[in-house]
Amino acid sequence: MKPIQLFKTLAVGVTAVGVLAATPALAQNKDYILNTASTGGTYHPVGTAIATLSKVKLLPKQKFSLTAVNSAGSGANVQALGADTAQFAIIQGLFGSYAATGTGPVTAPQTNMRSVSMLWQNVEQFVVANQYAKTGTAADLVAMKGMTMGFGKQNSGTIGSNRVLLKGLGLDMAKDFKLMHGGYGPTADALANGQVAGIGAPSGPPTGAITKLMASNAAKFTMLTVTPDEAKKMDGGRNLWVPYTIKAGTYPGQTKDLLTIAQPNFLAVNADVSEEHVYLLTKAIYENLPFLQAIHKATKAMNVQAATAGLPVPLHPGAARYYKEVGVDIPAHLMAK
């Protein structure tokens, strides 16, 4: 082949590639990574449900979708978003707050993190033996200094969030209490057996360990309420924990509604992800809630009016656009600057 012929052949090839790349119908599909957590928890199945929804509802026409991958949890997910090895992630609200402020285990503010939606809530549940429930509110925890308590496994998200909440009440968990480290089942059993005076078990009610405890011992234990003043102190200005009512009948022997607080598990996204894609994903989630709810019960409490409750970082403009369209009131601090 002569040189001029080679040049012409290459030119035609390059032109053809250019035409193909410029043709929308032939453009490559966009696949985003959604970090979840271990496969045995709630984050991974919920993330898989969202990813499946995107492939069913968005990929055919909108040409993008999410792929859910397991991870070591919220801390790892914050790192992955920062490194752009994931573009979406499910994150505990407290870790979102750490990311926003560069506090706790996060060494610098993660300015590229945005919120898409609150997914479901971790409800704070403090249960104590009746003799220590003098007021029936979180103030009783202050009066229980020096006692043995069950606030979660070592290095767990449970003990981490309990530490923060107690600090808001002026308590140093490590100094003011003797701690029994364990999961919800073992600590609830320890409460039933008198080995601990109280427990803190943030979860989605009804929590199995508390149901079991109350089923056989309802008259012996009290779940503490959290007053508005206590809630403000425990939140510590993070705008993270919000009021939550555990409805009467949720637990055996519970005859009245119980006011406490809850923090969100939320869907986070990098700020530089397409506004249109985040808008379409948010719209797909809320227009197809029965699809998600059929896959995992944690999503049954989701509704668009609660989508912004307790979010620790500003909304992505795409998500904000959808919420404005459907009339959701967006707090000023959640609007990205």
Image: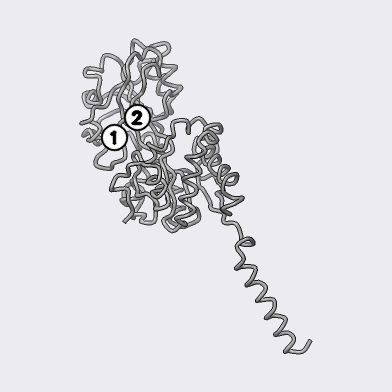
Frontmost residue, 201 versus 322 = 322
Please give the name of the residue rendered at 29% of the width and 22% of the height, measured from the top-left corner: 224
Residue 315: where, in percent of width, then height? 37, 49
Residue 311: where, in percent of width, then height? 35, 43
Frontmost residue, 188 versus 33 = 33
Q: Is residue 187 above or below residue 69?
A: above
Graded by Cα atoms within 10 Å as few (under 14), some (14 to 19) or many (20 or more), the crowding at tag 1 reads many
Frontmost residue, 30 versus 18 = 18
> Of label 1 and label 2, which has the lower sequence position?
2
Which residue has dot 1 on it?
A: 165
Mark 2: secondary structure = loop
Q: Is residue 17 left or right of residue 240?
A: right
Q: Is residue 10 above or below residue 86?
A: below
Contact between labelled residues 2 and 1, with CB atoms less than 8 Å apart: yes
Number of numbered discs overlaid on the protein picture: 2
| Residue 262's disc number | none
Q: Amino acid at mark 2?
A: Glu
Mark 1: secondary structure = helix
Q: Is residue 181 left or right of residue 128?
A: right
Q: Is residue 254 above or below residue 207?
A: above
Which residue has dot 2 on it?
A: 124
Please give the name of the residue rendered at 34% of the width and 49% of the height, measured from the top-left corner: 314
Q: Is residue 8 left or right of residue 192?
A: right
Residue 148: where, in percent of width, then height? 31, 24
Residue 97: where, in percent of width, then height? 33, 45
Graded by Cα atoms within 10 Å as few (under 14), some (14 to 19) or many (20 or more), the crowding at tag 2 reads many
Q: Amino acid at mark 1?
A: Leu
**Distance between the Cα atoms at labels 1 and 2?**
9 Å
Residue 207, by quadrant, is top left
Q: Is residue 241 left or right of residue 5?
A: left
